[in-house]
Amino acid sequence: MDEGKRPSLEIRKLQFMTDYAFSTRAIHAGQNCEKEFGAVVPPIYLTSTYAQEYPGKPKKYDYSRGGNPNFANLEASLASLEKGEFSTVYNSGLGAISSILSHLKPGNRVVSIDDVYGGSFRVLQRVFQNFGIESVFGDMNDFSWIENELKKGAQIVWLETPTNPLLKVVDIKAVAELTHRYNAELVVDNTFASPYFQNPLVLGADLVLHSSTKYLGGHSDIIGGGVITNNAAWKEKLDFSRMAMGFNPSPFDTWLTSRSIKTLAVRMEKHHSNAMTLAKKLEQHPKVKKVFYPGLPSHPQHEIAKKQMSGFSGIISVILDMDLETTKKVIASFQLFILAESLGAVESLVNHPASMTHASIPREVRLATGVEDGLIRFSVGIEDPDDLWNDLNESLNRS
């Protein structure tokens, strides 16, 4: 190509959002070389405020609560990976959730999947309910239940798929069509699948939510969140609530997330392959009562997962064939699986939802949705799969 005919930087950026494969977009979208000195890696803009050319006329940003170049870089990347037009980044996944909910009004209604992240349940039931926003929880594979709730005038349908921690899978496209029939909007928490394995906007979702703490960050060293949409009005609202309510992330955390996303494709492939290997072996282990993993043919929504996901990610939940105290002793005895909350990192983690991530959900509510006291959740990392299996197998056999 002649030098004079090379596309401009902005044109090439647009092409990276539309014409290239995922792994290429993960490395290049929102990752343009720094203009002044040509640094391949964009710098961290550790500034709280910006010089203005004239009172009330900033060059682009005025205060980092409202905007920062590192925010914009990560937003371009997330929008590209989720095949959306707009993105807004936050200080946490819960900041992103609260930003969405803050635009509801007293008397508005949220219809949510029952097997929902404990933090989502808590903020709906113990925070926004105080402002007159009603939330109801049920089985999202029961379309008659969803429709009955929509007929009552719900504004938002709230979906996780796969869910946390039972890994239920819901047909996003079908729920989107039903939701839009009643002029409601669909929010899909895509944290467990990551944009590498699933793109809810393509399937009809209005908003896609991520805790970037998890697979997007991938190294257990940042807290963050993001929302992606094709709706310009929602983008304006999401930016406003971040600025007005102080949900802004730090420039360093957004820079770290942009750095981490460059390896997202290769990490997700390894998470998936390791998890599939372990899920198959756990399903055959005599001390395992039940395995929850969308990639197994035994999973009740395996066919739906195959239809809307290109892979099954790295989370496995199991119920061991032993009492609760023995279960706790086993998961505290692993050498490679670290007993810790969170998920989606390069190191493998194990979690006991009833006493950790889902402790904020009343026990009777947990049990009604199938989250038994003995349920444990593995976040399978990218270590050698034989080493991970030996760790699991040896600890189970000692119990």
Image (cartoon, helix red, strand yellow):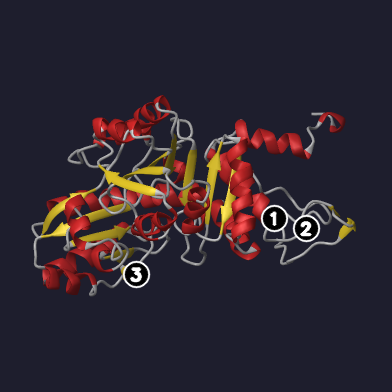
- Which residue position is annotated with label 1? 67
- In this rendering, the label closer to the viewer, 1 or 3: 1
Q: Where residue 354 sits in the image (x, y, percent)? A: 24, 64
- Which residue position is annotated with label 3? 340
Count residues near mark 2 (Cα–Cα under 10 Å), then give few for <14, some for 14-19, many for 20+.
some
- In this rendering, the label closer to the viewer, 2 or 3: 2
Asked whether, in this view, residue 75 is left or right of residue 137, the answer is right
Q: Where residue 4 sits in the image (x, y, percent)? A: 87, 31
Q: At x 22% / y 70%, what residue is drawn? A: 331
Task: Point out the tag, 1 or 2, that comes first from the N-terminus.
Answer: 2
Q: Where is the N terminus found, in terms of image quarters?
A: top right
Q: At x 75% / y 38%, what residue is drawn? A: 10
Query: Which of the two residues, 216 or 183, is positioned nearer the viewer here?
Result: 183
Q: Where residue 381 sits in the image (x, y, percent)? A: 37, 59
**In what element is the residue under mark 1?**
loop
Disc 1/disc 3 C-alpha distance (Å): 33 Å
Q: At x 54% / y 35%, what residue is drawn? A: 83
- Which residue position is annotated with label 2? 62
Please say whether residue 41 is visible from this viewpoint. Answer: no
Q: Amino acid at mark 2?
A: Asp
**In what element is the residue under mark 2?**
loop
Asked whether, in this view, residue 75 is left or right of residue 336, the answer is right
